[in-house]
Image: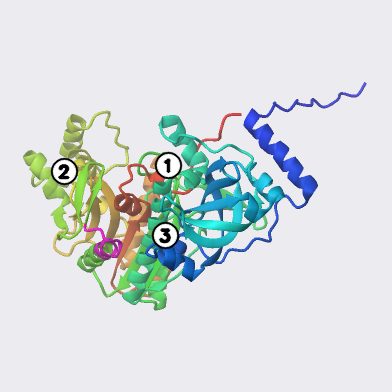
Amino acid sequence: MTDQPHKREAAPLPEQVAVRRDKLALMRKQGEAYPNTWRVDIDTAEIIRRCEALDDEQLEAAAELVSVAGRIMAHRVMGKSSFVQIQDGRGRIQLFLNRDALGEDIYAQSKKWDLGDIVGAEGLVFRTRTGELSVRASRVEMVSKCLRPMPEKWHGLSDKETRYRQRYVDLMVTPESRQVFRTRSKIMSLLRSGLEARDFMEVETPMLQTQPGGAAARPFMTHHNALDMELCLRIAPELFLKRLLVGGFERVFEINRNFRNEGLDATHNPEFTMVEFYQAYADVNDAMDTTETLIRDIGKSLGINEVEWDGVCVRLDQPFKRIRMDEAVFEKRPDLRGHADNKALLATVGLQEIEDFKPLITWKAGHYLAALFEELVEPELKEPTFVTHYPVDISPLARRNADEPYFTDRFELMIAGKEMANGFSELNDPDDQRGRLVAQMQAKAAGDLEATGVDEDFLRALEYGMPPAAGVGIGVDRLVMMFTSQHSIRDVLLFPHMRPEQA
């Protein structure tokens, strides 16, 4: 006897969904259920802009005939008349439906509309007795049936999780969420225009790479079937952008998606956006100046000179502070002054100061100094602050400081205790760069999963001669978090990474 495949019985539909599906079934019998015939000639924001200041006589004289469409957010049936509030991509407006104007059959159908349905309406703009700007519908059409009930409330931890998973619903019902992503789009545009105004050229570099480089991070690996080769998703575009400096493009930038196989928290998502820009014949000081000006100019364009972020009042109209990493640590631990390269001492202090301290066997003195900085200083850097003089040990791509070769001409920009940008004078000595990449390869072999390796093609490019330059990477997601006062990176990503839903 042949085994029959198990057939799972469909779960009964929730009552509201079943009712809506019955309405859809009737629509299918009557014709096209999801037509693509309705056209709009104006959005709600433009109606309000044109008509809000007009009085009743002026509105009547203007005879503003409009065709609009949107999602039903409220629906009140009052006998022969109905009031329907719709929402489009720019705002909301009320529709006034009357049986005599629409005809008995059409009006009867409109009374069966549900919250969430997308409908179209054509009519004259007028003001109701209560003074609300509305459209007196002379023609209406069901454009798209909503089969799931709209949420009544949208707050609390469990609903917050749903907001991330079902961003489409979040955007329907949360005006603040829509505004965050409009602001994000504006920030991206301002970054691009700000760099283009400084004569930077936008470029695109590979996202699939044969070797990770440009940052300390674990990559996502994949396999190219046709070429039968292992590839990784990029962790940073830096090494390709520097190749372009070698080729003669002296000012380049890329707004890029990066992928790092790391944990998730309030400021980290495995897939994230950065802008990186590189300028020939510039140094770390030029890089800091450009970074500060870019961020301040974005604030001015958004009308933001100061912003409240994670309990910190961030002033963007004041010069950003500049401090040295080692000096900041010495202020907390004066006994370390003069010992920035003393690995044994720094390791001992690290064990004293850092709870659950787990250094890697590959760590050098610079790693311990950076760990102490992150523990003792970084959380206290609330106002915008450039931290400079990072040790060579943790800066494999940055140029050594001419006066203090243990340190590099590198900075990180900290705001509200969070890293916002990283930049430095670029290392263009191919022999020094080879030595540092070899050290990275050795660290990786010894167990440092975030270390990279030796990119021979990049070194070959440097051997052709790269002009002295400076480069910067700015975290776009965190920048948006700051300007929109959001605590979690998930609130500024349309579709943040989530664990799969349980069946």
Asked if disc 3 and disc 1 are in contact, CB closer than 8 Å, the reply is: no
Q: Identify the mark nearer the N-term, 3 or 2.
A: 3
Which one is nearer the viewer's eye here, 167 or 224? 167
Helix, strand or loop for disc 1: loop
**Image location (x, y in percent) of residue 50:** 43, 67
- Answer with left or right where residue 462 lies relative to residue 297: right
* Mark positioned earlier in the residue sequence (1 or 2): 1
Position of residue 325 in the picture relative to residue 445 (left or right): left
Left or right placement of residue 489 versus residue 25 in this view: left
Q: Which mark is residue 424?
A: none
Quarter the C terminus occupies: top right
Which secondary structure lies at badge 2? loop
Q: Residue furthest left?
A: 334
Q: Residue at x 14, y 56 (%)?
A: 321
User: Residue at position x 24%, y 41% from top?
Assistant: 371
| Sequence order check, earlier mark of 3 and 1 | 3
Q: Kindly identify which numbered label has been placed on residue 342.
A: 2
Q: Is residue 308 left or right of residue 232?
A: left
The residue where tag 3 is placed is: 185
State the extent of the magenta-drawn residues as a range: 296-305
Q: Is residue 298 above or below residue 367?
A: below
Colour pattern of the rendering: rainbow
Q: Nearer the viewer, mark 3 or mark 2?
A: 3
How far across and down, in percent of the image, does residue 80 sit? 60, 45
Magenta stretch, main secondary structure class? helix
Q: Is residue 36 above or below residue 363?
A: below
Give the residue type at disc 3: Ser
Q: Nearer the viewer, mark 1 or mark 2?
A: 1
